[in-house]
Image: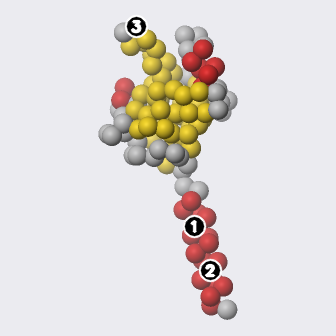
Amino acid sequence: MKFYYILIIIALFLLLTGCKIEKYGSDITVNKVTPISQALAEKDSLDTITLKGEIGAVCPTGCWFYLQDQSGEIYVDLAPSGLAIPQRSGKKAVVEGSFIKVKDRSVFVAKGVEIQ
């Protein structure tokens, strides 16, 4: 009987720690998720948006990363917001931010990141 209790405790621990969401920067306030392909196509006309996908390559210091969904991939810059994330390639993430002009191109700058 003790074995079953230990098994249940271990299962609950794994369930609770596996569902932890890591948050960096501002809270995500825009609930509508914009597909990455749409964000890239309409970047000059969008305000604050929320993107959702899988983290690809991450800067060694965590100041930028690539986010991928079924529609495409986008470079997410965290440095202008003073943020950095740990190495979490392959994890699901939700980011909120907007495009800014840097020299002659638009860059997506995240103000908030949630990693699952």
Which residue: 40% across, 42% down?
85
Residue nearer the viewer, 104 or 101: 104
Residue 29 seen in the current view: no
Q: Secondary structure at mark 2?
A: helix
| Above-or-below relation of 6 to 61 | below
Is the C-beta separation of discs 3 and 1 under 8 Å? Answer: no
Within 10 angstroms of label 2, few (less than 14), some, or many (20 or more) residues?
few
Mark toward the start of the polypeptide (1 vs 2):
2
Q: Residue at x 60, y 13 (%)?
A: 42
| Rendered image quadrant of residue 44 | top right
Does 77 sit above or below residue 16?
above
Residue 116: horizontal and vertical position, in percent?
Answer: 55, 48
Which kind of residue does numbered mark 3 sit on?
Answer: Asp
* Secondary structure at numbered mark 1: helix
Looking at numbered disc 1 in the image, what kind of residue is underneath it?
Leu
The residue lying at 47 percent from left, 32 percent from top is: 66
Residue indicated by mark 1: 14
Q: Which residue reaches farthest bottom?
A: 1
Q: Which residue is the site of mark 3?
A: 104
Quarter holding the N terminus is bottom right
Q: Could you say which quadrant of the image residue 29 lies in?
A: top right
Residue that mark 2 sits on = 7
Is 43 on the left or on the right of 60, as rendered? right
Q: Residue at x 62, y 88 (%)?
A: 3
Counting from the top left corner in percent of width and height, residue 13 is at 57, 70
Residue neighbourhood size for the residue with mark 1, other residues' Cα within 10 Å, grouped as few (<14), some (14–19), many (≥20): few
